[in-house]
Image (tube, rainbow, N blue to C red):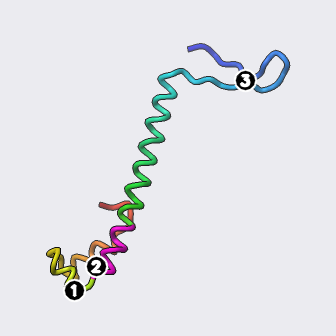
Amino acid sequence: MKAVSLATPTGRSGHIVLPRTRRRALRAGMNRIYATLREWRRRSRDRAELARFDERMLRDIGVTPGDVLQEINKPFWRR
């Protein structure tokens, strides 16, 4: 790979152009981060909603209050 100069002949900073494979890797990494953050937010919302269910609703979905307590006390990054 060639070395990239950060200065133009006039002394001003130029742009760094990443090779295509580096751009793809960077984009893929950013997409993974975004997907992870989206998943964490979904878990947090789902657990908050589950905490608002009453006993009748829990019976309808086949979940005990103990299961709910266990689930809502998990941190958002845990499955």
**Residue depicted at x 30% and y 75%:** 50
Check disc 1 and report the residue beneath it.
Answer: 55
User: Nearer the viewer's eye, disc 1 or disc 2?
Assistant: 1
Q: Can you give x and y, in whole percent of width and height, for residue 7 in the image? A: 77, 22
Check disc 3 and report the residue beneath it.
Answer: 6
Q: Can you give x and y, in whole percent of width and height, for residue 54 in the image? A: 26, 85
Give the residue furthest to the right: 10
**Residue depicted at x 37% and y 56%:** 39
Neighbours of disc 2 within 10 Å: few (<14), some (14-19), many (20+):
few
**Residue depicted at x 39% and y 66%:** 44
Q: Can you give x and y, in whole percent of width and height, for residue 40 in the image? A: 40, 59
Check disc 2 and report the residue beneath it.
Answer: 69
Asked whether the beta carbons under mark 1 and mark 3 sit within 8 Å of each other, the answer is no
Looking at the rendered structure, which numbered label has been put on residue 43?
A: none
Mark with earlier residue (1, 3): 3
Relative depth, front residue between 22 and 53:
53
Relative depth, front residue between 65 and 45:
45
Neighbours of disc 1 within 10 Å: few (<14), some (14-19), many (20+):
few
Give the vertical position of 36 relative to 11 (above or below).
below
User: Nearer the viewer's eye, disc 1 or disc 3?
Assistant: 1
User: Does the magenta-highlighted stretch encompass residue 67?
Assistant: no
